[in-house]
Image (cartoon, rainbow, N blue to C red):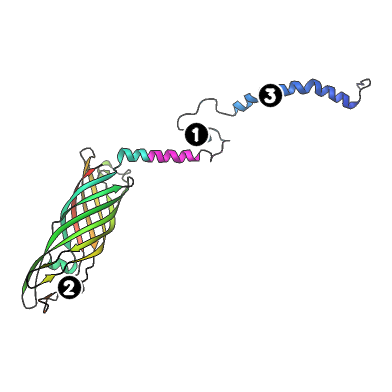
């Protein structure tokens, strides 16, 4: 069947079609488009801790990356303020020995001192310490002349402490808080003499390395610690033979480093 419109060409026929159908269709699309847009989004509010990138697969996964980072940093800061320490002050006491040749002529000293530690985070701290004590040196010359002198050694050190992560071990071991310590210090030796022998005053820079542990007490307001450290130090006369009255040889060269065994009672802040 063929429709023929009188005095109406093909273009006029199409204009009639668009006039009657275009406006209603456009209005229908405008009404329905918000409903289609809402259907793509989650209908319920997001739960706490769930980001848009997790709820909507079409969202940009990198858009909320900074929020992940900020959350991790916030948790780290909260953990530090809850369980960490800002700084500690402690009293040091213990024993100190020589090594090598000095160990054969020097006795054990009982040094004491003080320390101050500043914590960057839960695992890393910087420590300033001062410790001093006297050693007795006893030996004889080749002709049998006895010598007994007392010399004092003082150490000022700057060390860095790294505490091991003990979250995955049993509670008893975790409370020990083991750490490594390393740094450097200035070691000063006082002069002393007994008439036959004179030990000159000297100082030199040394290197420290050691291990230790800290046990919290009094609800973590204080702690008790123990540490073993080796101190490498070289004085100017280590390669010079000890002589009495500048003439009598002894066959002894004062070589050796220091080992300290110390206990600490500290207060946490």
Give whichever of 106, 169 is nearer the camera: 106
Q: Percent from the top left, x then y, of residue 81?
A: 32, 39
Does residue 85 sit above or below 208 in this rendering?
above
Q: Which mark is residue 146?
A: none
Q: Is residue 4 left or right of residue 65?
A: right
Q: How many marks?
A: 3
Q: Percent from the top left, x then y, of residue 185?
A: 25, 59
Helix, strand or loop at mark 3:
helix
Q: Main secondary structure of the magenta part?
A: helix
- Quadrant of the frame with the N terminus: top right
Q: Is residue 268 magenta?
A: no
Mark 2 or mark 3, which is nearer the start of the sequence? Answer: 3
Q: Percent from the top left, x then y, of residue 158?
A: 27, 55
Mark 3 = which residue? 30
Q: Percent from the top left, x then y, of residue 213?
A: 24, 49
Label 1 to label 3, Cα distance in Å? 30 Å
Q: Residues within 10 Å of mark 2 (few under 14, many from 20)?
A: some
Q: Residues within 10 Å of mark 3 (few under 14, many from 20)?
A: few
Question: Image point 22% across, 51% down: which residue?
Answer: 115
Cβ atoms under marks 3 and 2 closer than 8 Å: no
- Quadrant of the frame with the C terminus: top left
Segment tinted magenta in the rendering: 58-76
Q: Is residue 73 magenta?
A: yes
Label 2 to label 1, Cα distance in Å? 72 Å
Mark 2 = which residue? 253
Cβ atoms under marks 2 and 1 closer than 8 Å: no
Question: Image point 13% across, 65% down: which residue?
Answer: 106
Q: Which mark is residue 51?
A: 1
Which residue of the protein is positioned furthest toward the right in this rendering?
7
């Amino acid at each position: 069947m063929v429709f023929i419109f009188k005095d109406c060409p093909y273009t006029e026929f199409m204009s009639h079609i668009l006039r009657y159908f275009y406006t209603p269709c456009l209005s229908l699309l405008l009404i329905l488009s918000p409903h289609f847009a809402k259907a793509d989004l989650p209908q319920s509010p997001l739960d706490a801790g769930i980001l848009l990138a997790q709820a909507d697969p079409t969202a940009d996964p990198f858009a909320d990356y900074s929020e992940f980072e900020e959350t991790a940093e916030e948790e780290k800061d909260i953990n530090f303020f809850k369980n960490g320490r800002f700084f500690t002050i402690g009293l040091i006491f213990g024993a100190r020995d020589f090594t090598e040749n000095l160990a054969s002529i020097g006795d054990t000293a009982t040094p004491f001192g003080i320390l101050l530690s500043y914590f960057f985070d839960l695992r890393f701290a910087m420590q300033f310490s001062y410790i001093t004590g006297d050693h007795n040196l006893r030996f004889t010359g080749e002709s049998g002349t006895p010598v007994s002198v007392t010399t004092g050694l003082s150490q000022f050190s700057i060390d860095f402490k790294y505490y091991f992560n003990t979250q995955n071990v049993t509670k008893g071991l975790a409370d020990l808080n083991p750490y490594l310590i390393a740094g450097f210090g200035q070691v000063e030796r006082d002069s002393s003499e007994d008439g036959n022998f004179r030990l000159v005053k000297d100082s030199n820079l040394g290197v420290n390395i050691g291990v230790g542990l800290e046990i919290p007490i009094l609800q973590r307001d204080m702690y008790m610690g123990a540490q073993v450290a080796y101190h490498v130090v070289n004085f100017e006369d280590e390669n010079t033979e000890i002589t009495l009255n500048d003439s009598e040889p002894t066959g002894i060269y004062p070589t050796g480093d220091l080992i300290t065994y110390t206990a600490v009672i500290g207060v946490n802040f």
